[in-house]
Image (spheres, rainbow, N blue to C red):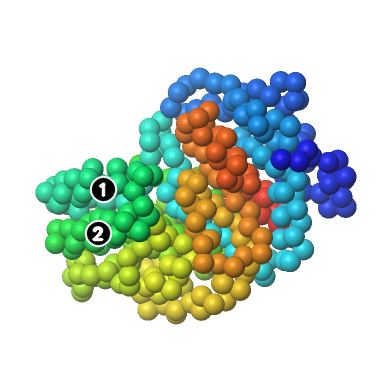
Amino acid sequence: MRPMTSPLLLSPSPCRLLRRLFSRAPRRRNPTTPRPLAPHLGRRLPLHLPASMSSSSVGTPDCVVADADALARKVAAIRAAGPAKLQVIADFDGTLTRYWYDGSRGQSSHGLLRQGNEEFDAKREALFEHYHPIEINPDIPLPEKAKLMEEWWGKTHGLLIEGGLTQEAIKKSVADAAIAFRDGVVELFEFLEARDIPVLVFSAGLADIIEEVFRQKLHGSFKNIKIVSNRMVFNEEGCLVAFKGKTIHVLNKNEHSLDMAAPVHDSLGDPNGSVDDYSLVKKRTNVLLLGDHIGDLGMSDGLNYENRIAAGFLNTNIEKSLKDYSEAFDIVYLNDASMRGVVELVSDLCP
């Protein structure tokens, strides 16, 4: 990594985010910075920046930029192109939502689901115990793993249908769930909506559950947000009978999924809404990508972007994972941070 050069920070319109980072960055003589209070630990721990980052990285207690030169160039390019060329691609679980909830691990949109049928809940849990080790096994070739993920998702969807999942069960599951959006998410969505910047929320889970989380936890919807996920079909009695489109799983959760997913309606809860012209989204060649796993970087696969800023949320195992995250993402938000840093970033991108 090249050392930071001062002329970059003295440009006519320097990035406010980087100015804040430099004003709060620790001196290189002492690269150890206290990190925020972890809600599940109840005490502060020192944050040790990796030695390979120390000459060119910038850090605060809540975020780290490994290559500030590169980030500043991307900010300048996206800013010059304007909001009409920008789109936001976001993961849902652990990115838009908090990792910790009242001191314990929060639930995912898929994990919160209860069918109201203990037998089928147990069967889905057994599938997880069998397939999840396959999902995270780096030694299995991707083509083979993709087939197994397709198999897992197919069996799970079959159990949801066979077990009689209802719309009411989804509503109750969300109401009882330990899930919440990060502070600042509403502010981010409002900022982007006001500038007609589309937000594509990618998930290998279930769109209907994610939309219900939006309804209950945000108490509203945003016309610029589209959910790209597996969508259910319910009959007149509100019982699940099928799934729309092809299956979206963890290995094909990217912009290729725009052509695979069922049409996403404009208004949450309106299945008769208009179909989006995804070609217009694909013409937005500047991307702000938000994720909490390095694998989330693949969400922009299939898009010929010109500039991409990748912001990663490192929610746990910070000491162990910081080096990998800081090399993969342009900016890393630490310790289940709020979304306010991203709000500040988009304010720089679209002043």
* Residue count near mark 2 (Cα–Cα under 10 Å), binned few <14, some 14–19, many ≥20: some
Q: Position of residue 174 (x, y in %)?
A: 32, 51
In the displayed structure, does residue 153 sit left or right of residue 330? Answer: left
From where the camera sits, is residue 45 visible?
yes
Cβ atoms at labels 2 and 1 below 8 Å apart: yes
Residue pushed farthest left? 119
Above or below 84: residue 43: above
Q: Residue flagged by tag 1: what amino acid is it?
A: Tyr
Secondary structure of residue under mark 2: helix
Could you say whether the residue bearing mark 1 is in a helix, strand or loop? helix
Residue identifier under label 2: 151
Res 280 → quadrant: bottom right
Q: Earlier in the sequence, mark 2 or mark 1?
A: 1
Viewer-proximal residue among 195 and 215:
195
Q: Which residue is mark 1?
A: 131
Q: Identify residue type, mark 2.
A: Glu
> Which residue lies at the image location 67% right of the left edge and 40% below the top edge?
65
Q: Quadrant of the N terminus?
A: top right
Camera-side residue of 345 and 329: 329
Provide residue 336's location: percent of width, then percent of height.
51, 37
Circle on res. 66: none
Classify 278 as above or below 253. Answer: below
Question: Which quadrant is home to the C terminus?
Answer: bottom right
Q: Is residue 153 visible?
A: no
**Residue at the image point whose x is 42% and y is 77% from the top:** 273
How many other residues sit within 10 Å of disc 1, few (<14), some (14-19) or many (≥20)? some
